[in-house]
């Protein structure tokens, strides 16, 4: 057991060494992002006019009496090259635009506005344009990019790498804390010095372990590399979310006009949950109206709806009941990760973020005190430690490596460093 614990200490140290700078940045930027609902209303006081030539994308009718109507525009379509595919900013890519050899085409899920959109704000009572704001300049979008990519799209892998190693740090920390026959008694409440820091470090990690696991796992589900692994496993077990077939078309009458915005809004209200929603107009004569939910925190009211452009009859609907068990867990988990389930959710994530900062800080304080005591920089690994790992431990390790490609790649680098250190230590011990 002692040999196994020494290996856990070593891995725990490597995880902290790799993850600390990125995890600290992710925790602080995450706290900032979580409170965007309170920050955004204080910002964006001055708005500008919408530029000419932009294409109408969707409207977001006011859900409460104090909200404005939001009308989203997209940049002018880019002219297609000779013989090239049509570049469309709309929601309803037609089967003609897709390769004919493709047996089925599906619409992409469309919950939320593109960062390329320009949103015009309109007074719902007077119809007066209040102003406009590029979606990319919203504090919410900026804070999300800061948290997930550090404002550089090429740096997204860093946050994923940090999340992967923080998960390793969490697992090894719990295993080190877990009581056992050979585990020495934890430091008493009146302990001082490094023992006191160790006690508070363990308390913070254990108390926030459940929240940490949810935040880390949900974050990894939509990461670039680990997310692909998760989606592959999801689809392999038949838990893929419902997909919207792109073949739906409205019946074009010999005479008659498409539904007005108000009529389409009323039709959507009749066929969808009572929740804030986005309405998108038809892109062609046989296109359709599309509506989906936008309300933060209303996970069980998420829906996607297609309506006949002329009659308002529903052509397609998928809601909470149509989601798979995995899909429901993912939707709720992601909304929890973003702090969209209410003030209690925001408060818990604030505590989690501060807990991460505290755990990392106390961990490095212990390391500095360890070095001042003349102890080795790296926790020593006892002889036979690798052989002491149980089959369950190896299985869990292989599962984490398979699920998190960046963890696997960085673990190879760590293994190379460990091998180099072993060679150097053997050379230093030779007479």
Image: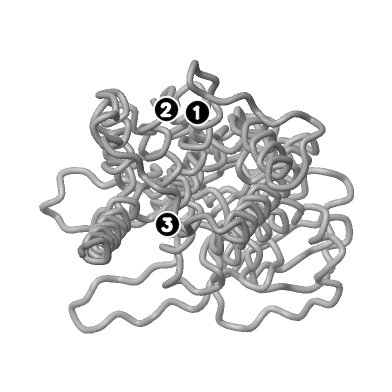
Badge 1 is on which residue?
A: 329
**Residue 22 vertical placement versus 350 (above, below):** below
In front here: 204 or 268? 204
Q: Which of marks 3 and 2 is nearer the N terminus?
A: 3
On the picture, is 16 further left or further right than 390?
Answer: right
Spatial CA span between label 3 and label 2: 24 Å
Q: Is mark 2 on a helix, strand or loop?
A: helix
Spatial CA span between label 2 and label 1: 5 Å
Whether the residues at callouts 2 and 1 have beta carbons within 8 Å, the answer is: yes
Name the image quarter holding the N terminus: top left
Badge 2 is on which residue?
A: 326
Give percent across and percent down for residue 252.
40, 47
Badge 3 is on which residue?
A: 161
- Marks 3 and 2: which is nearer the front? 3
Q: Is mark 1 on a helix, strand or loop?
A: helix
Q: How many marks are shown on the rendered structure? A: 3
In front here: 379 or 139? 379
Q: What element carries label 3?
A: helix
């Amino acid at each position: 057991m002692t040999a196994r614990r020494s290996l856990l200490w070593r891995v725990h140290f490597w995880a902290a060494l790799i993850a600390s700078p990125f995890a600290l940045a992710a925790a602080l930027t995450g706290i900032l992002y979580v409170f965007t609902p309170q920050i955004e209303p204080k910002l964006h006081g001055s708005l500008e006019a919408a530029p000419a030539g932009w294409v109408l994308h969707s409207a977001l009718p006011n859900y409460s009496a104090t909200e404005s109507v939001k009308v989203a525009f997209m940049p002018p379509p880019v002219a297609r090259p000779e013989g090239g595919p049509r570049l469309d900013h709309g929601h309803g890519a037609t089967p003609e635009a897709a390769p004919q050899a493709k047996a089925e085409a599906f619409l992409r899920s469309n919950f939320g506005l593109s960062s390329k959109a320009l949103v015009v704000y309109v007074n719902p009572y007077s119809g007066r344009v209040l102003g406009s704001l590029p979606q990319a300049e919203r504090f919410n979008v900026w804070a999300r990019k800061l948290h997930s990519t550090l404002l550089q799209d090429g740096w997204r892998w860093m946050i994923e790498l940090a999340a992967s190693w923080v998960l390793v740090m969490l697992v090894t920390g719990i295993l080190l804390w877990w009581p056992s026959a050979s585990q020495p008694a934890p430091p008493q409440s009146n302990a001082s010095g490094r023992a006191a820091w160790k006690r508070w470090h363990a308390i913070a990690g254990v108390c926030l372990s459940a929240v940490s696991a949810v935040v880390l796992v949900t974050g990894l589900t939509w990461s670039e590399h680990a997310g692909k692994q998760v989606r592959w496993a999801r689809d392999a077990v038949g838990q893929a979310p419902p997909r919207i077939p792109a073949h739906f078309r409205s019946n074009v009458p010999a005479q008659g006009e498409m539904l007005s915005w108000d009529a389409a809004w009323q039709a959507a209200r009749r066929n969808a949950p009572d929740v804030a929603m986005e309405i998108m107009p038809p892109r062609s004569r046989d296109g359709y109206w599309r509506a989906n939910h936008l309300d933060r925190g209303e996970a069980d009211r998420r829906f996607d709806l297609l309506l006949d452009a002329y009659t308002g009859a529903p052509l397609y609907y998928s809601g909470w009941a149509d989601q798979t068990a995995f899909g429901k867990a993912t939707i709720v988990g992601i909304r929890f990760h973003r702090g969209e389930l209410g003030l209690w959710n925001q408060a818990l994530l604030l505590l989690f973020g501060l807990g991460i900062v505290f755990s990392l800080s106390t961990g490095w304080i212990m390391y500095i005190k360890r070095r001042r005591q003349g102890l080795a920089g790296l926790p020593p690994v006892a002889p036979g430690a690798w052989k002491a790992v149980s089959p369950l431990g190896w299985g869990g390790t292989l599962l984490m490596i398979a699920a998190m490609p960046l963890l696997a790649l960085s673990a190879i680098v760590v293994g190379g460093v460990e091998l180099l250190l072993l060679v150097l230590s053997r050379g230093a011990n030779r007479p």
